[in-house]
Amino acid sequence: MSVTEAALVLSDGSLFEGEAIGAAPEGGISSGEVVFNTVLSGYQEVLSDPSYAGQIVTFTYPHIGNTGTTDLDDESARPSCAGIVVRDLARRHSSWRAELSLDEWLKRHGIAGIAGVDTRRLTRHLRNHGAVPGVFGTASETDLRAAASSATGTDNNDLTRLVTTPEPYVRPGGPRRVVAVDYGMKASLLAHLQPLATVSVVPAGSSSDDILALEPDGVFLSNGPGDPAAVTHAPAMIAELLGQVPVFGVCMGHQLLATALGASTYKLPFGHHGGNHPVQDTLTNTIEITSQNHNYCVDPQGIAGVELSHINLNDQTLEGFVGTEVAALGVQYHPEAGPGPHDSGYLFNRFAALMDARAT
C-alpha cells in the first residue's frame, strides 16, 4: 500500500510527522483546534458528534478503526470535525456490523486525517500547553508552518450556526411534548428523549415565542460546538422561557442555561474529552463515570437561584446544577453517552419528573 507523507504543525511551531489518511484536504492543508480524546472505542460517534466542529481530534488510544464503521453509529448526518489524528489506523477492520472502513468513511464525508503520529508526545504537549490551533496535510513544511502561524481556535466563534438544523422537524415518542433547541444535537440524545415525549427539534436561532407556541411540557437545550460566550442570542431567549416551562440543558445547553441565570464561562486548558470522567452527584452523594466533550466550563460565581449538583472529581469544576426558584436542570457532561458509560441516564428521568410536577 502506498503511503503519502504528511505532517501536523501546531501554532507554537511543534512538528509531528505522519502519513495522510481519509480525504485529501483542499490545498493540502486542514486547519482547526487540536484536542485529544481518551475513549478506547466509539471513534465513529466521536467524529460525527457536531460538538467537534472546528476541532482536530487526536485519539490517545493507539489503534483506531479496528471495527470499521456503520451508518447506525453516526451521531449526525455528516461529521463536522476539522480532522483526525491517530497513532495506528487499522488496515483491516473486523466486525459483522461494519459497512465501511474508517478510512473509507472519512473519504465519504470529506474528512482528512493523519496517521503514524506519536500521539503520546502530542497528548503530553497538549496537556502541558493546552489545546492549540494547528494544521496538518501534505503541503510543504514551509506552507504548513505559515498556515499554522495564522490558525485560529474556537474562542469567540459561534459554531452552533454551522451545525444546527436549518428547519424544524418532529420525532414522535412518549406522552409528553418536548421542544429541543438544536445547537448541534447528537442523534443519541434525541433517541433518549423520544421515550419521554414527542420531540419538536427547532433551530438554534428560534425565539421563545416560537418555542412556547408549540405548547411544550419541557424545553431541552442540546450540546454544541465552540465558545458559549459567542452564542449571544441564546441566553436572553432562555431567560424568557425560565419560569414558564421546565428547561434541561446538556453541555453547550448547560452553559447557555447557566449564562441565562447570571453565570459566565471560561476556557479549560485542554478541555474534557473522553468516556471516563468521574463526577459526584452531590444531591445523592453518588459517583458516576461520565462521557464528556467540552472545552469551556461554567464559573459558578454569579449564578443565581440554583443548587450546585455535580462536581468533576478530577479538577473540581462545575458539572451540574438544579434550579431552586425555577424548574431547570443543567449538566456539563453527556448523559446519553454515545460513546461512553450509561451511569447518567437517570437525568432524563429527572427531566421527566420536572415536567410531570409542572403538569400537576
Image (spheres, grey):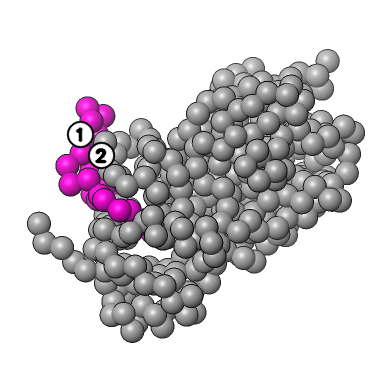
Quadrant of res 307 = top right
Residue closest to the eye, 221 or 302:
302
> Is 88 within the magenta?
yes
Q: Amino acid at mark 2?
A: Asn
Q: Residue at x 86, y 51 (%)?
A: 302
Cα gap from disc 2 to disc 1, whole angstroms: 6 Å
Residue range corresponding to the magenta coloring: 82-105
Residue closest to the eye, 276 or 229:
276
Give the position of the N terminus as an image quadrant: bottom left
Question: In the picture shown, does residue 7 fall above or below 243?
Answer: below
Q: Residue at x 36, y 45 (%)?
A: 61
Residue 66: assigned label: 2
Q: Secondary structure at mark 2?
A: loop
Position in image of residue 258 (x %, y %): 77, 46
Residue closest to the eye, 327 or 152:
152
Quadrant of res 200 = top right
Q: Amino acid at mark 1?
A: Ser
Q: Is residue 175 visible?
A: yes
Question: In the picture shown, does residue 139 fall above or below 44?
Answer: below
**Where is mark 1, residue-wise?**
94
Q: Is residue 160 visible?
A: no
**Cβ atoms at labels 2 and 1 below 8 Å apart:** yes
Position in image of residue 215 (x %, y %): 74, 31
> Is 77 within the magenta?
no
4 horizontally vs 324: left or right: left
Overall secondary structure of the magenta section: loop
